[in-house]
Image (spheres, rainbow, N blue to C red):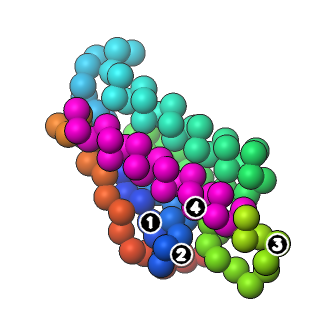
């Protein structure tokens, strides 16, 4: 089972972690794993390239564990950074919502949660 935990501080979703394997099918044919992997990279690349956010992420090639953190998703006193904050936090929250939709059909292969956690920059 793939476990995805999203982290929020107040109303801002600032990161997530992924671990485990879907085991929906054999490697190369696992559509659940492929979907989660593709969406993960889409979210990371969009935050970094489109929104010019500083994203700290680690991908363990052996275990496929992923950790993504982005301080730019948190509110700050700088009014100019507010659009970026809403964009990145919204992107992460959109990923959470998409995975929740996937749970309807793939609940045996996916576990998704949204937890309150202070950013520990």
Horizontally, is 44 left or right of 17 in the view?
right
Q: Is residue 22 visible?
A: yes
Residue at image mark 4 = 89
Q: Is residue 27 visible?
A: no
Label disc, if present, on residue 7 of the rendered structure: 1
- Of all residues shown, which one is farthest toward the bottom? 77
- Splitting the image into 4 quarters, where does residue 102 fall? top left
Secondary structure of the residue carrying tag 1 is: strand
Considering the whole magenta stretch, tell me its main secondary structure.
helix
Could you tell me which residue is drawn at 42 percent across and 29 percent down?
A: 35
Residue 48 horizontal/vertical position (percent): 72, 49
Q: Disc 2, disc 1: CB below 8 Å?
A: yes
Residue at image mark 2 = 119
Alpha-carbon span between mark 2 and mark 3: 21 Å
Viewer-proximal residue among 66 and 113: 113
Alpha-carbon span between mark 4 and mark 2: 13 Å
Please provide the residue range marked out in magenta.
84-105
* 74 up-or-down from 63: above or below: below
Label disc, if present, on residue 66 of the rendered structure: none
Horizontally, is 116 left or right of 45 in the view?
left
């Amino acid at each position: 089972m793939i476990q995805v935990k999203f982290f929020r501080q107040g109303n801002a979703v600032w990161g997530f972690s992924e671990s485990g394997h879907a085991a929906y099918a054999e490697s190369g044919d696992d559509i659940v794993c492929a979907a989660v992997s593709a969406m993960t990279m889409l979210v990371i690349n969009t935050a970094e390239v489109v929104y010019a956010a500083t994203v700290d992420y680690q991908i363990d090639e052996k275990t496929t564990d992923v950790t993504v953190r982005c301080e730019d998703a948190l509110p700050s006193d700088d009014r100019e950074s507010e659009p970026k904050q809403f964009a990145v936090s919204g992107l992460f929250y959109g990923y959470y919502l998409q995975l929740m939709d996937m749970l309807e059909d793939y609940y045996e292969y996916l576990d998704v949660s949204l937890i309150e956690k202070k950013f520990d920059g």
